[in-house]
Structure formats: C-alpha cells, structure tokens
Image (cartoon, rainbow, N blue to C red):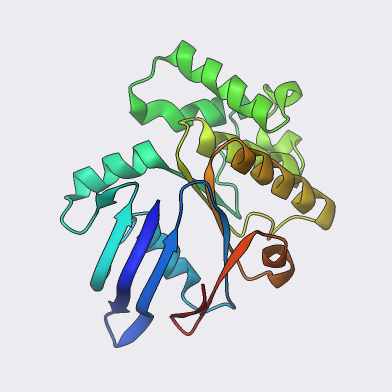
Amino acid sequence: MLEFTDVSKAYPGGVTALRGVSLRVEEGELVGIVGPSGSGKSTLLHLAGLLDRPSSGRIGLAGHQVDGLSDRQLSALRASCIGFVFQSFHLASRVSALDNVADGLLYCGVQRAERRSRAAEALHKVGLSHRLDHAPHQLSGGERQRVAIARAIVSQPALLYADEPTGSLDSASGDGVLQVLRELHADGTTIVIITHDRDLAAGLPRRIAIRDGRVVTA
C-alpha cells in the first residue's frame, strides 16, 4: 500500500528532516508511526500523503510510483486513495455534522443528495447518527473528532492517515476515537496513526519508530 525507498527530505537553509528512510506498509495493516517532536513525523506524513515531494528516494502508493507524476496526477491519486484525520478537526464552525462530512465529496463529482446520503452513512459508521444536524460547537471533542473521521472516510479511501487523532482529547474520548479507528481497520481500511504517544502506539499491532529523521524500528 505504501513504500518508501531511501527517502530523504531537505529544506532550504540546510535543514534535513528525513534521512534515507525506507519502510513498507502492507494493505490492511494498522500501523503507528511514533517519535518525539522534531523527529520527522510531520515531514513523513506530508510525503506519504502526497502533499510534498522528496528530495531523493522513491515513494510508491497503492501500486503507483509517484516520482514522475504531475501535481494534477498527485492530487487525483490523493483524492481517490487517501483520507486524512488531524488533531485540530478542521470542521466548518457553522455547518452541521452532516454537511461537514458531505463537503468531503465536493470535488468528487457527486451530486448533493448522494453526498448527503453517503455522509449520513459515514456518520453512522462512527456512531453519530443522532448528531447529524448538530454544529461543531454543539459536539464534544470526541464527537468532533468522529465527524472528522467520517469526513475522511466518506470517499471510501483505501488508506487513512490519522495525525495525533487523540492529542487534544481526554482519555475517555481518545479511547472512543481509537475504537472507531480499530473498527474501520477491521472493515479493511489500511490505517497509519502518527503519534508521539508511546502508550497509544504500544497498543497497535505494529509500530515504526522514527528519531532524528531516521527509522530506528520498523
């Protein structure tokens, strides 16, 4: 599903964020990428999510070698294959949970009625069928993260990246969000969780540890 081969990323000013990273995530895995702040996790996510290009090395995703793809081709591959969940939710404040999720299909050529139908189904999957008409300010932190997960999966991506998905939640809400992710994994979604929380990572089937821009445990 995802493969890095000797990938490095350097930025202007002599900052090297990743150094010769090689890793592989198989289809259907649930994997944690764990490391302290400044270890290179965010850079790895941007590259794995096709949001940036490496300085050197090769990246394969869902059977595609992405090195030679144009920006438009990368955008199309990202839209068809990848879902993102972020710590800060990124929900529209005055829009219902249903429409926040439906908006995840705006650029997929899906008609409004179908967008809302698929959004309702995604919210049902994360246990929020009773909150369709609630705006984000009417939801708890855990519920808002579930809306963000529903928005990420409404296009039925094969690969889901969750970046610190429990970082801003209390322990009970965080446990609920992790349970949702586990259920999605059981349904066949490949999930990569990026976190600095070693306790969270310890409960996952596989962990990839990164430090100072290098993979130290794969």
- Can residue 126 be seen at all in this image of the molecule? yes
Residue at image location 39% in from the left, 27% down from the top:
106
- Please provide percent x and percent y for residue 155: 45, 31
Relative to 9, say whether 93 is above or below.
above
- Residue 101 in which image quadrant: top right
Between residue 144 and residue 7, name the one nearer to us: 7
Residue at image location 47% in from the left, 67% down from the top:
42
- Residue 11 in which image quadrant: bottom left
Residue at image location 35% in from the left, 30% down from the top:
107
- Please provide percent x and percent y for residue 144: 68, 41
- Left/right placement of residue 17 relative to residue 210 reads left
Between residue 48 and residue 167, name the one nearer to us: 48
Between residue 16 and residue 205, name the one nearer to us: 205
Residue at the extreme right of the image, as rendered: 172
- Can residue 53 be seen at all in this image of the molecule? no
Relative to 12, say whether 196 is above or below.
above
Residue at the extreme top of the image, as rendered: 113
- Please provide percent x and percent y for residue 51: 34, 56
Residue at image location 77% in from the left, 42% down from the top:
140
- Please provide percent x and percent y for residue 63: 30, 47
- Left/right placement of residue 159 relative to residue 66 reads right
- Left/right placement of residue 25 relative to residue 124 reads left
Relative to 34, say whether 171 is above or below.
above
